[in-house]
Image (tube, helix red, strand yellow):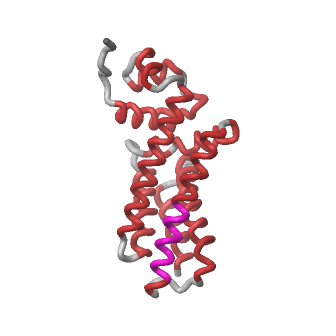
Amino acid sequence: MGRAKEFDTETVLRKATSVFGAYGYEGTSLSLLLSELGIARQSLYDTYGTKHDLFVSALKFYIQQKTEAGIRLLNECTSVRQGVTQLFNEAVNVLTDNERRNECFIINSAVEQAPLNHEIAAFIQMTNREMEDVFQAALLRGQKSGELKHAEEELPGLARFLNYSRLSLTFTAKSGASAEVLRELVRTTLKVMD
């Protein structure tokens, strides 16, 4: 009979997301990973497989958590403007929080790995389409209620723009932009809904 796991797999995935976000996939050595995660090498292999397998699991975990939170927010908002604004402002809050922002930076590692890994590329494309659909559905509700003045045929492009603008905040923050620069970018981006 095998030993029971002595760690919480979700906690390990959160920590792995932060480590890969801070150091990048290539910059994260196995010894650094094990030290930061606080688990033994064999536990890593038994539970997640290789470093690459753990990276993919952490990436999927992170993106699914963020996507589900974004979907809930946009589906439940009564005002589309308010919901989209809240989504963007929360992204800035996370990216300017020293404790939480490294998790977001795993997106940069994912983009770096996507051309080399079909599974990562396909997963990113799938979740981007999912978020675009959710943005589009929210925008359509806003258009039908009169909150937005855009023509219906403009909404797919607007949804895509909002999704990729949201993602670009991570790159901008990792490049060293200040909180004020991020907030200015958000204000400018949100004007597309005027």
Which quadrant of the structure image shows residue 117?
A: top right
Q: Nearer the viewer, residue 64 or 102?
A: 64
Q: Nearer the viewer, residue 145 or 80?
A: 145
Residue at 49% over, 18% down: 31
Image coords of residue 132 (percent x, y): 55, 63
- Count of marks, rendered view: 0
Residue at 50% over, 70% down: 187
Residue at 59% over, 60% down: 164
Residue lying at the far top of the rendered structure = 1
Give the answer, above or below, for where 60 lies relative to 50. Answer: below
- The quarter in which the N terminus is drawn is top left
Residue at 35% over, 34% down: 11
Helix, strand or loop for the magenta stretch, by majority: helix
Image coords of residue 75 (percent x, y): 40, 67
Give the answer, above or below, for where 149 lies relative to 119. Answer: below
Image coords of residue 180 (percent x, y): 47, 61
Left of 29 or right of it: where is 92? left
- Residue 104 colored magenta? no
The magenta segment? 131-143
Image coords of residue 27 (percent x, y): 58, 28
- Residue 142 colored magenta? yes
